[in-house]
Image (tube, grey):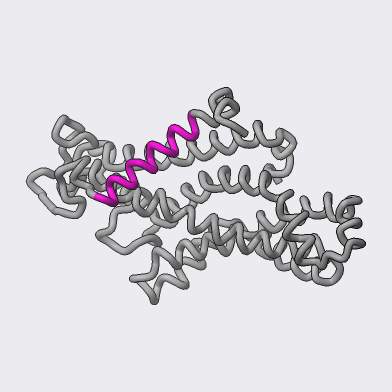
Amino acid sequence: MNLKDITKNMNLTVGLIIILSFLILTIISTADLHILTPYNPNQLNFSQANIPPSSNHVFGTDQEGRDVFTRSLTALRIDFSIPFLIVGISMLIGTIIGILSGYFGGLLDEALMRITDIFLAFPGILLALAISEILGSTHLSLRLYLSALALAIVNWPIYARLVRAQILQVKNMQYITLAKVAGLNNFQIIKKHIIPHLVSLLLVYTTLDMGTIILNYSILAFFGLGAPPPTPELGRMVYDGLSALPQNWWSSIFPAIIITLMALGYSLAGDGLRDILDPRLGERTNV
């Protein structure tokens, strides 16, 4: 894959533009928020409450007079960054389990796949809500990371299934047999011959998965299971603005649009990567 391939694929190009735009905004808002806005994201100013979008307040202000644009930028520090942690943990756990299950087979495969099936039997977001509530109720200061862990716990089985399916296709190929005859041990075979076959699959699916995780984490934040107040989070901002609808529509709508755009960016990028790397991956990433 080269720059020409990227620019020729509209989905990938648009997706990367969206992702890079949010990445730049996240970096700037983390380094020095005042480069982009003069307001304090948590400063209450009831005399400025419910001001509609204007030149002074691009996204308007909420019921407590806080600038919605400033709070949205601050929220990106969590909402754009935390999905990387969630997807990283999910991929690591799922890949390890998928490799062990697919490569070694037998009773180990049966046991690991039954555990995987148990997790897949429950609606993912409902299970994550339950786990977040249980873990976060006694550790408010760690609730953000516990919610991320909850999403990772319910998300790894998909990776395990995808990796296992890929390994079952390649582990009996002739070059794997020759590697065994040559004296390579299982670890060497997995490292040199199995893992390289997983790279394209994991790259495509993790990109697609980022969009799903952004939406799912926003749902947890919507229900108050993210970072504790007054830390801004887009999902929680959507919830807080609902009480002022329809008059103060901007408090909910703009954070919701940002969530949607971030998820859309990863979805488009994932589709584009799939088209470039291997169109056949579409069948496996839709499992």
Pick the front one: 80 or 261: 80
As for residue 26 lying within the magenta part, the answer is yes
Q: Nearer the viewer, residue 124 or 277?
A: 277
Tell me what residue is drawn at x 25 percent, y 44 percent: 244
How many numbered circles does the render carry?
Answer: 0
Q: Is residue 19 above or below residue 228?
A: above
Q: Quadrant of residue 22?
A: top left
What secondary structure predominates along the stretch shown in magenta?
A: helix
Q: Residue furthest bottom?
A: 138
Start-end of magenta stretch? 14-31
In this rendering, is residue 171 above or below 185?
Answer: above
Q: Is residue 237 left or right of residue 266?
A: left
Q: Position of residue 124 (x, y in %)?
A: 58, 57
Q: Residue at x 61, y 36 (%)?
A: 273
Name the residue at the front extreme. 182
Asked whether residue 229 is drawn in magenta, I would say no
Horizontal and vertical percent position of residue 263: 48, 41
Q: Quadrant of the rendered structure where residue 72 is?
A: top left
Classify residue 81 as left or right of residue 187: left
Give percent across and percent down for residue 121.
68, 60
Which residue is at 47% across, 72% downward? 134
Q: Position of residue 223 (x, y in %)?
A: 40, 57
The image shows residue 179, relative to residue 49, as above or below, that is below
In screen coordinates, is 131 left or right of 242? Answer: right
Residue at (62, 43) in percent of width and height: 204
